[in-house]
Image (tube, rainbow, N blue to C red):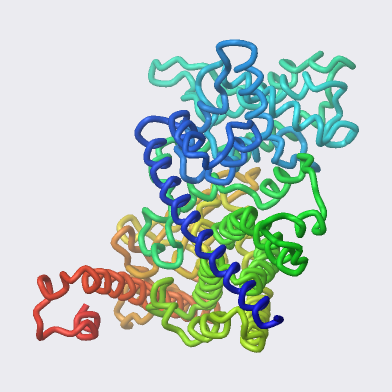
């Protein structure tokens, strides 16, 4: 009887698993069609299609959650226009307000002043602020409401008496940002008359009497002005809308164009707290396992009821965990602590799919584990031709698949769980090393004007910095610059005035196209003064002489630059080989390899020749 019960339970589990896989395959197809509709016909038609296919309900919560989870798949301008829409009547207006509120309410503004909260809201939440005044008004009203709910009572960060002050100050900050950084402010020269930039005194004067209690604190407003002046709010780039399809960062980091695309995408990535917060603000009814076990599905089998409930619960929520991990991986080089937390989420999610025999979900989380491994290895400089396709042939992957293939083999499942634990711990140890490197990168880029672009490549690392004299080959003019050496770039910058706190970049030179000369014959006139302190940099962009402060410093710089050049060239070669290898495998799978490549040529030979 026990054996029959065991076999019956296994049969029901397998049937349910197969049905679930069919449903998820159908859901993925519905999603792809919907994204195509959004691109060609607009976001409203996309949502109507999903609701008609019963992929989701038309409730404001479901609509806003869908937009938040898949925001990277939509054009930022289109998403901003949709969030700013009003209604034709009172019912539709209320419906739109609830969608907008649920979308923004999932964002936490706790611990931010108004400028910090507004900067985060406009640059990290997936949409571009629309141009229509009424739409801007609706979005900013919702922001003001949510910010006030999070910070009311915090007199240091939110020293206001009501929500209206937040609304007015937010508009003033947007106008200030536009005035200082977007408008063509030119002085009265060459008969061109344009208005001057708004001064701090003008900004403070404009905000007199805004709060119902009187004038706002001068220091509070001055700090906002200084922050906007030093670092503008970079609104999400509208031109990046059609290129926001997420790419595999482990393969496509070989060109400068991808760096800018990744930088644009990172500005639209949802934060990990937002998804969890969006799930926590709603009330859900619950019923007991005993009640469920009495249903026709479970036939008074409490153990099967537990398995069934756990599987259903995780099947309904696993994509949230998957999205959180993906978001963290996409901004891995910006959030080291987030990577450690994402490892925990991945560990328990993967273990859950193995224990519940959820093969499709397990495959999705295993591929995320592979992304973690590729990221940490390449961050450490171990560049190989591996990618997310070839990783399926590796021992750890095949062993994990074999151990977890049979749900009735408890020893195999335990072995798979142990295997996951050891892999995660190894990754955690490597992340502890990366944390210091990431902190150093952040510290360096903060001292460079608009240096945030240097954080776009997750594999870039900081090597060293120092002051040296740059001597032009043509004019012979000598200028002192601050040189910053990264793993793939040499950047030199300077402060334009004694009062400047940030270095302004003069030039960025990719290392893989650079050549260094540090030996000069005795007859060389150009280094006669400092032969032991000089070396030449030759590059297609710019070539010049560099004079260090001492012979030892020159020797150290030359050594570090040459090592970085060698590593970067090796990385470029491996990336190109990986690209060619992936292309050839695709041709082989399509049966077209023989049409393009002569039969006598081998793949290894072609790669070697390249």
Work out whether residue 467 or residue 292 is closer to the camera in this orientation and state it.
Answer: 292
Work out whether residue 493 or residue 345 is closer to the camera in this orientation and state it.
Answer: 345
Quarter of the image with the C terminus in it:
bottom left
Work out whether residue 269 or residue 122 is closer to the camera in this orientation and state it.
Answer: 269
Q: Is residue 433 visible?
A: no
453 sits left or right of 590 in the view:
right
Residue at the spot 49% in from the left edge and 48% down from the top edge: 265
Q: Number of marks in the image?
A: 0
The single residue placed furthest to the top in the displayed view is 89
Tell me residue 28's x, y (percent). Answer: 45, 52
Vertical side of 76 occupied by 250: above or below: below
Residue at the spot 74% in from the left edge and 16% down from the top edge: 205
Tell me which corner region of the image, top left, top right, bottom left or bottom right, holds residue 472: bottom left
Tell me which corner region of the image, top left, top right, bottom left or bottom right, holds residue 15: bottom right
Residue at the spot 45% in from the left edge and 80% down from the top edge: 563
Vertical side of 186 occupied by 380: above or below: below
Tell me residue 123's x, y (percent). Answer: 58, 40
Tell me residue 544's x, y (percent). Answer: 36, 63
Vertical side of 246 occupied by 114: above or below: above
The single residue placed furthest to the front in the displayed view is 1
């Amino acid at each position: 009887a026990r054996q029959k019960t065991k076999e019956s339970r296994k049969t029901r589990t397998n049937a349910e698993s197969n049905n679930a896989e069919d449903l998820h395959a159908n859901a993925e197809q519905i999603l792809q069609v919907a994204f195509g509709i959004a691109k060609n016909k607009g976001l409203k038609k996309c949502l109507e299609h999903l609701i008609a296919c019963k992929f989701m309900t038309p409730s404001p919560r479901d609509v806003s959650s869908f937009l938040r989870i898949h925001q990277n798949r939509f054009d930022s301008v289109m998403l901003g226009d949709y969030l700013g829409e009003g209604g034709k009547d009172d019912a539709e207006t209320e419906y739109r307000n609830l969608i907008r509120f649920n979308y923004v309410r999932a964002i936490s503004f706790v611990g931010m002043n108004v400028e910090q909260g507004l900067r985060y809201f406009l640059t990290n939440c997936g949409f571009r602020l629309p141009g229509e005044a009424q739409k801007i008004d609706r979005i900013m009203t919702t922001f003001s409401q949510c910010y006030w709910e999070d910070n009311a009572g915090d007199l240091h960060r939110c020293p206001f008496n009501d929500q209206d002050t937040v609304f007015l100050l937010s508009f003033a900050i947007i106008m200030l940002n536009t005035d200082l950084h977007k408008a063509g402010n030119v002085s009265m020269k060459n008969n061109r008359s344009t208005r001057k930039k708004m001064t701090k005194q003008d900004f403070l004067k404009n905000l007199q009497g805004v709060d119902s209690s009187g004038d706002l604190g001068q220091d509070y407003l001055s700090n906002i002005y200084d922050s906007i002046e030093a670092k503008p709010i970079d609104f999400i780039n509208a031109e990046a809308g059609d290129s926001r399809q997420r790419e595999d960062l482990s393969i496509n980091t070989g060109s400068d164009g991808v760096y800018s695309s990744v930088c644009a995408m990172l500005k639209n990535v949802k934060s990990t707290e937002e998804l969890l917060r969006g799930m926590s603000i709603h009330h859900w009814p619950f019923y007991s396992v005993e009640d469920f076990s009495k249903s026709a599905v479970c036939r008074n089998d409490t153990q099967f009821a537990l398995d069934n409930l756990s599987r259903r619960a995780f099947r309904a929520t696993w994509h949230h965990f998957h999205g959180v991990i993906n978001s963290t991986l996409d901004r891995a080089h910006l959030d080291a602590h987030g990577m450690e937390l994402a490892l925990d989420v991945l560990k328990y999610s993967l273990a859950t799919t193995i224990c519940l025999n959820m093969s499709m979900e397990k495959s999705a989380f295993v591929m995320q584990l592979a992304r973690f491994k590729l990221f940490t290895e390449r961050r450490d400089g171990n560049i190989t031709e591996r990618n997310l396709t070839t990783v399926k042939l590796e021992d750890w992957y095949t062993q994990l698949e074999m151990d977890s293939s049979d749900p009735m083999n408890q020893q195999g499942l335990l072995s798979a769980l142990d295997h996951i634990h050891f892999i995660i711990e190894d990754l955690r140890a490597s992340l502890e090393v990366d944390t210091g490197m990431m902190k150093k990168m952040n510290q360096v880029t903060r001292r460079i004007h608009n240096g945030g672009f240097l954080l776009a490549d997750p594999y870039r690392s900081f090597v060293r910095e120092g002051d040296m004299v740059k001597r032009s080959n043509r004019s012979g003019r000598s200028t002192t610059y601050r040189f910053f050496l990264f793993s793939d770039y040499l950047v030199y910058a300077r402060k334009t005035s004694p009062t400047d706190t940030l270095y302004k970049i003069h030039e960025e030179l990719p290392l893989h196209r650079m050549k260094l000369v540090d030996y000069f014959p005795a007859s060389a006139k150009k280094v006669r003064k400092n032969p032991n302190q000089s070396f030449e940099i030759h590059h297609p962009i710019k070539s010049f002489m560099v004079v260090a402060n001492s012979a030892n410093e020159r020797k150290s710089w030359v050594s570090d630059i040459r090592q970085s050049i060698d590593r970067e060239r090796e990385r470029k070669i491996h990336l190109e080989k990986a690209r060619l290898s992936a292309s050839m495998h695709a041709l082989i799978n399509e049966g077209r390899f023989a049409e393009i490549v002569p039969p006598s040529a081998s793949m290894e030979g072609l790669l070697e020749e390249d």
